[in-house]
Image: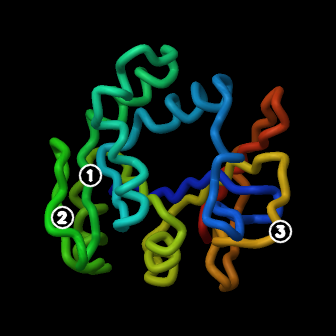
C-alpha cells in the first residue's frame, strides 16, 4: 500500500500563508528545492484542492522550463510525470495533462487509491490535508520550517491533536529545517 504524505513549507510559527494570504517568504532556495525534488521523485499522484491546484498548475506551463535554473526545470519534470487529482466543486475543468477533476473529497475513494497505488501519494494544501488527516488517511507529515515568524494566517496543521513519530530531520544552510514525521 502506498503512503499518503502531506508536506508543507511553513513559517516557524506554523503558517503556510501570512495574514494577507502571501507566502512569498516561503520560496525555497536552491539547496532546499533540490532536496524537495529528491523527496518528490517517489510520488505517483498529487491530491490538491482548488487553491493549491491554482498555485501548482504553473509547473505545467512553458515558463517552468524556459530560462529557469536547473533545480526548477528538474522539479517541473518530476511534477509533470505524476498524476494529479483536483478536488473542487467550483472549477469547470482542469487544463493539464495527467490531471483529473473530482467534485468532492471522498475518503473511501482516497483509501482505495492508496491501496491500489504502486507509488506514494502527496496531498497539497493545508485545508485538504486537514480533511485527510481527520479521516485517518495521512501517513506522514513533512514540514519545511522557514526562519521567519509571520504572526498569523493560514495554519499548516489542523487544530487537532496529532501523535507523531520523528523519522527524519535536516538543517539547511539558509536556516530552513525539514522535519518528517509518521502519523501514529
Residue 73 image offset from top left, x and y in percent: 41, 21
Q: Is residue 112 above or below residue 144?
A: below
Q: Earlier in the sequence, mark 3 or mark 2?
A: 2
Can you give x and y, in whole percent of width and height, for residue 169 in the image?
Answer: 75, 43
Q: Which residue was labeled with disc 2?
A: 101
| Alpha carbon separation for disc pair 3 and 2 | 34 Å
- Considering only vertical position in the picture, is 91 above or below 122? below
Q: CA distance from mark 2 to mark 1?
A: 9 Å
Quarter where residue 177 is shown: top right
Number of numbered discs on residues: 3
Q: Quadrant of the C terminus?
A: bottom right
Q: Which mark, by number, is residue 84? A: 1
Q: Pick the residue in front: 54 or 87.
A: 54
Position of residue 165 measured from the top left corner of the image (x, y, whole percent):
71, 62
Which residue occupies 36% across, 61% down?
48
Residue at image position (36%, 21%) is 65
In terms of sequence position, does the residue under pointer 2 or pointer 1 come before the other?
Answer: 1
Residue that numbered label 3 is attached to: 151
Q: Quadrant of residue 155?
A: bottom right
**Viewport quadrant of the N terminus:** bottom left
Q: The residue tagged with tag 1: helix, strand or loop?
A: strand
Q: Residue at x 42, y 22 (%)?
A: 74
Q: Nearer the viewer, mark 1 or mark 3?
A: 3
Amino acid at each position: 500500500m502506498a503512503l499518503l504524505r502531506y508536506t508543507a513549507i511553513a513559517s516557524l510559527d506554523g503558517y503556510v500563508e501570512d495574514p494577507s494570504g502571501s507566502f512569498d517568504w516561503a520560496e525555497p532556495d536552491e539547496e532546499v528545492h533540490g532536496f524537495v525534488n529528491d523527496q518528490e521523485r517517489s510520488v505517483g499522484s498529487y491530491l490538491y484542492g482548488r487553491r493549491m491546484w491554482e498555485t501548482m498548475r504553473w509547473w505545467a506551463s512553458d515558463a517552468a522550463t524556459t530560462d529557469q535554473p536547473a533545480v526548477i526545470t528538474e522539479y517541473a519534470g518530476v511534477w509533470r510525470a505524476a498524476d494529479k487529482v483536483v478536488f473542487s466543486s467550483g472549477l469547470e475543468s482542469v487544463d493539464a495533462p495527467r490531471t483529473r477533476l473530482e467534485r468532492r473529497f471522498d475518503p473511501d475513494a482516497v483509501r482505495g487509491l492508496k491501496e491500489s497505488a504502486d507509488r506514494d501519494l502527496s496531498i497539497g494544501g493545508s485545508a485538504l490535508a486537514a480533511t485527510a488527516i481527520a479521516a485517518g488517511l495521512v501517513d506522514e507529515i513533512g514540514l519545511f520550517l522557514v526562519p521567519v515568524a509571520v504572526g498569523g494566517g493560514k495554519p499548516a496543521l489542523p487544530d487537532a491533536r496529532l501523535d507523531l513519530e520523528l523519522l527524519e530531520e535536516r538543517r539547511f544552510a539558509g536556516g530552513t529545517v525539514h522535519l518528517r514525521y509518521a502519523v501514529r
